[in-house]
Image (tube, helix red, strand yellow):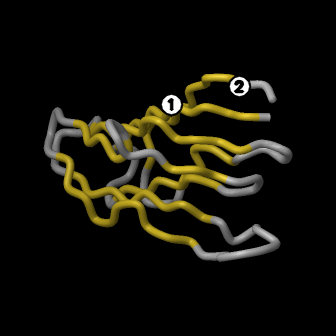
Amino acid sequence: MANAFKSETDTAIGTSPATIYTCPSSTQTTIIGLTCANIVTSQIEIDVQLDVSTRTSGAEDSVYIIKDAPIPVGSSLVVVGGEQKIVMEPGDTIKVTSNTASSADVAMSILEIT
């Protein structure tokens, strides 16, 4: 098995869900960090979802990792990090939505195992 550390980013996320990462086929991914930053001049609220609806077995849900989380002006929120990790299977996606247009940047650190 090959291991590869990677980072995924997206900028100016707004009110439509932005897919930050999709776990490739024949791969398991561990999210080791996910940070969302407020890039506008007012407080925003973000949602981060793990969408596993494309799985062919087991749970096939879209679940919130965090919902309506406030991020003050000039701040960021560590959604995943420290001792918390999230495991993804092939086809799973991470989606981020803000309550304000073009207002959030996201940085995600992952470990892909193929």
Q: Name the residue under label 2.
A: 3
| Mark 2 / mark 1, whichever is N-terminal | 2
Q: Where is residue 107 in the image (x, y as percent from the top left)?
A: 45, 32
Mark 1 residue type: Ser
Name the residue: 57% across, 44% down: 20
Badge 2 density bin: few <14, some 14–19, many ≥20, Cα 10 Å: few
Q: In this view, does 37 lie above or below 68?
A: above
Numbered disc in front, either 2 or 1 = 2
Q: Is mark 1 on a helix, strand or loop?
A: strand
Nearest to the observer: residue 77 or residue 100: 77
Residue 47, how many percent across, how many down?
A: 38, 60
Mark 1 = which residue? 109
Q: Which residue is drawn at 68% across and 57% down?
A: 92
Label 2: which secondary element: strand
Is residue 37 toward the left or the right of residue 95 in the image?
Answer: left
What's the amino acid at mark 2?
Answer: Asn
Against 52, residue 31 (above or below) is above
Mark 1, Cα crowd under 10 Å, few <14 / some 14-19 / many 20+, is some
